Image (cartoon, helix red, strand yellow):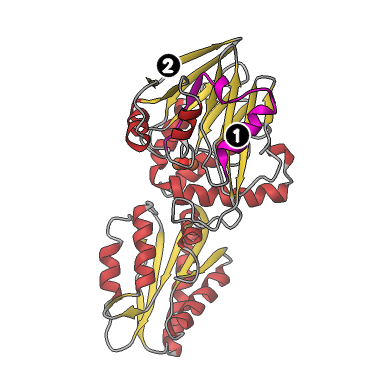
Amino acid sequence: MKIVALSDALFCIPVDVHTADLFEGIWPIPGGVTLNAYLVKGEKTALIDLVQDRQDAPKQVEEALASIGADFGAVDYLILNHLEPDHTGWLRQFREKNPKAEIIATAKGINLVKSFYKIEAGLRAVKDGETLDLGGGKMLTFFETPNIHWPETMMTWESSTGTLFSCDAFGSFGVLEGRLFDDEFSQTELAAFENETLRYYANIVASFSSFVEKGIQKLSGLSIAYIAPSHGMVWRKDVAGIISRYLRYASYSKGSAEKEIALVWSSMYGNTKKGLDAVIAGIEREGVPYSLHRAPNDNVSYILADAFKSAGLVIAMPTYEYAMFPPMAYVIDIFRRKHIHHKTVLRIGSWGWSGGAQKEYDAAIAGLKWNSLAPFEWTGNPSPQDLAVLESRGRELAQAIKV
Ligand code: FEO
């Protein structure tokens, strides 16, 4: 692990994590993830967040600190913007290495320090707007940003360098492999990270978009030179760009999504797939971009990302045992949990001896605020007449998205 200077008194300790484990136990990270801790040195020293102990993090952080002549004992304050264990997992080990450092978090965060880690002493709860003077011209200000994405979350502001330690906000999946700042990546690489930033948002933050808007509004008076998240790159060249993208993502939750269509499909023996192909032909005739995911073959993490950003959805599934095809029922339940709202949606599918998927589907999407076009179902193999209707429905959906 190396340490990277943002200034002569402010450092980042980035840890590239490669693991077959799922992030939060649910989201795949084939490209890994970088976790960042930060060090701010005034007359006193503050360490901001820890990093998950997947690869002997305590030893790696210790070595990084040693490279600038510091050690755990030199830390006066440990600031925990957020208590999720990817940023706090070895807190008890830290406490053993440094019994005197004051652990700082919001009041809700301090409660989690007690319940997760059974630490009771040396804790300080800070309020929104409270400051911590490190001396030497280094002043930290804490801003409560609840539900971005846990209730106890705060961000920390260092005014002399204009650095916002933004916690999970503005972060992404993907490892940085030795680079840290946004201006160290090519446009192609940045585009790939943007996809992983969107997937991170859709998977982890999307349920809380209204809080993202409130948080960004609260911080809008700051003159930000660096956005330093707890995952992924530090933004210094295009600070406005990443803030703008986050506001755009938040707007997807309110219906201002991209003029694209995400098609999510399941098929048992190819009959629903034939219908889907006819819908695709209709969409292509209208020239609307689309993405295609099969459930359960594609992981729901990627389905979520495309569904979240797209104004239109196609849900294609057969009836299975008088109800929805089970993998699609799971996808729709995830849509409900992650607030995939305000979409224009076409649902199609075949059935054998009896329908039933549509009835369960209608109940499942009741709270999703979707504009549902007339669904279309057929028995068994779609007839030429069925395929003509399906192509027409695809065109109708695409036309609705284009306006
Ligand atoms: Fe990266 Fe919500 O923890």
Q: Is residue 151 placed above or below 204 in the rendered structure?
A: above
Q: Quadrant of the N terminus?
A: top right
Q: Give how far apart the Cα atoms at labels 2 and 1 are.
A: 28 Å
Percent of width and height locating residue 222: 54, 22
- Tell me if residue 272 can be seen: yes
**Which of 363/150 is in front?**
150
Residue 130: image tag: 2
Q: Kindly indicate the quadrant of the structure image that contains residue 125.
A: top left
- Tell me if residue 372 can be seen: no
* Magenta residue span: 56-83
Residue 125 lies in magenta, yes or no?
Answer: no
Residue 347: image tag: none
Q: Residue at x 65, y 19 (%)?
A: 9
Which of labels 2 and 1 is toward the front? 1
Q: Residue at x 46, y 23 (%)?
A: 99
Q: 348 left or right of 48?
A: left
- The three-letter amino acid code for the residue at tag 2 is Glu
Q: Residue at x 48, y 83 (%)?
A: 274
Query: Looking at this rendering, what residue extends furthest in the top direction?
Result: 136
**Which of 134/216 is in front?**
134
Tell me the SS state at disc 1.
helix
Q: Residues within 10 Å of mark 1 (few under 14, many from 20)?
A: many
Percent of width and height locating residue 221: 51, 21
Can you identify the residue that label 1 sits on? 61
Q: Is residue 358 placed above or below 252 in the rendered structure?
A: below
Q: 225 left or right of 168?
A: right
- The three-letter amino acid code for the residue at tag 1 is Val
Q: Earlier in the sequence, mark 2 or mark 1?
A: 1
